Image (cartoon, grey):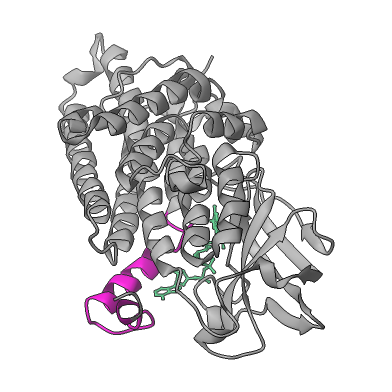
Amino acid sequence: MSAAGDATAHHTGSWKMSYFLNEDQRLMRDVAAKFARNELMPIANQIDLTETTPEWVTNRCGELGFLGVFIPEAYGGLGSDLTTACLILEEIAKASPAFAGLLSVEMILCPEVVRILGNEEQKQRLLPASASGERVMAYSQTEPAGAANVAFHQTRLTQDGNGYRLNGHKLFCTQGHAKTYLVMCRTEKDGAQGYGCVIVEAEDEGFQVQKYEEKLGWRGTNTGPIAFTEVAISADDILGNILSGGPDHAPANQVSFIGHAATSLGCMEGLFDLTKEYVLQRELYGEPMTRLSPVTDRMAQIWTKIEACRSLLYMSTRMHDEGGLTLPMGSACKAYICETAFECTSQLLQMWGGSGIMHSTGVNRYMRDARAKMVAEATTEMHHSIIAGTIGLGGPFASLADRLG
Ligand SMILES: Cc1cc2nc3c(=O)[nH]c(=O)nc-3n(C[C@H](O)[C@H](O)[C@H](O)COP(=O)(O)OP(=O)(O)OC[C@H]3O[C@@H](n4cnc5c(N)ncnc54)[C@H](O)[C@@H]3O)c2cc1C
């Protein structure tokens, strides 16, 4: 069995935060930690190597309440706060950062888009089924013109009698076992009024998953291009009012960025715990490896960086949960924690010597997942651009602060 699969590492991490957590938050964190350790860790390396996540994993997340944790109780969820959602993602990422990335999309981003943009009928239709895992959702924005370059996006919603038609194609859509797609598109109008979101079902005629990409990291999440050819869209499938301008779903993105940062925190902690166990038992030159001061020095530095990221993350979730702004804290968390996770996982990998390079140990996937996270859900540079715009330095995202207040 792999080193990662064998591991019974003592997971520390969010346990340090217990003092700040309420009983519900501690309970959900413990349930997630148990699931991650006992059910996910044994197959985490297989998910990475085969690029396949069994559907039961998603179903189990529905049963355990994870998929509905951030969905209001009125729509079949647990109505918990962002702190709880992030604690779950952090624990799950310790075992499989790739699956945690997918879960973040299904648990936070998609339900938030529906909660913010949807009318009552759409929320009742989509959210309870998403919470149970019966009908999880995917979010599709990126096009060949660039993810954030929405003015140049080509996927179009056009009027057709009493209904509408959707045509176009999207890149890099992370789908897992999604049955419902939230698709960003343009209408015939120009400008902000002409950009918004429609609901497409996997079984809709004219919808096609073109392929699943083989990826460096975040493997097993079914990411790939999707296409729409004359897909019939009824007025009930338009989220918000893109035809005349409606609420902006950018707050959903900001909250989602924090969820992704939580997965990167868990990613570095997961590898830290495995590496700590490894260096404690490994002997070099007849002595424990921990007698080498560069090892303990580096581990201490990484531990400190992890704790700095934890402070940034949970300070931001608390701000959110107490009604404070998430802009630009979502971007700050996403950029800083994801960059730090790549730096730390790369250094931790080095301590495994040749064993870290071999896929069979299940160690290098943490570094590859951390690397993919620096691009997925907007690159670090895009997040810096959002931060710059928000703090008054101008640039392409300067209007975000005004729009979101
Ligand atoms: C594993 C994975 C999963 C993904 N899942 C999804 C998904 O589910 N749904 C979805 O819609 N998309 C998804 N994506 C797409 C992802 O959001 C985009 O790849 C990412 O936002 C970058 O956009 P791009 O690929 O178009 O790069 P580009 O926009 O072409 O960027 C190219 C370069 O320009 C830089 N750049 C771009 N804009 C700016 C700016 N404003 N300021 C400074 N530098 C900038 C970038 O940092 C990058 O270095 C996924 C991507 C990956 C890797």
Q: Where is residue 192 in the image (x, y as percent from the top left)?
A: 50, 85
Residue beneath the point at 24% across and 46% down: 314
61 over 82 or under it: above or below: above
Q: What stretch is highlighted in magenta?
A: 374-402
The reply, left or right, for residue 265 in relation to residue 151 is left
The reply, left or right, for residue 113 in relation to residue 185 is left
Q: Which residue lies furthest to the right in this view?
A: 205
Q: Position of residue 262 (x, y in %)?
A: 35, 44
Is 32 or 42 nearer to us in this picture? 32
84 over 378 or under it: above or below: above
Q: Residue furthest top?
A: 286
Is 324 or 142 nearer to us in this picture? 324
Q: Say which quadrant the C terminus sits in.
A: bottom left
Question: Where, by quadrant of the figure, is residue 30 drawn?
Answer: top left
Q: Say which quadrant the N terminus sits in.
A: top right
Say whether residue 284 is visible.
Answer: no
Question: Where, by quadrant of the figure, is residue 355 drawn?
Answer: top left
322 over 51 or under it: above or below: below
Q: Where is residue 215 in the image (x, y as percent from the top left)?
A: 60, 48
Residue beneath the point at 73% across and 73% down: 168
Residue 17: in magenta span: no
Residue beneath the point at 57% across and 45% down: 128
18 over 126 or under it: above or below: above
Is 285 or 391 nearer to us in this picture? 391
The reply, left or right, for residue 67 in relation to residue 276 is right
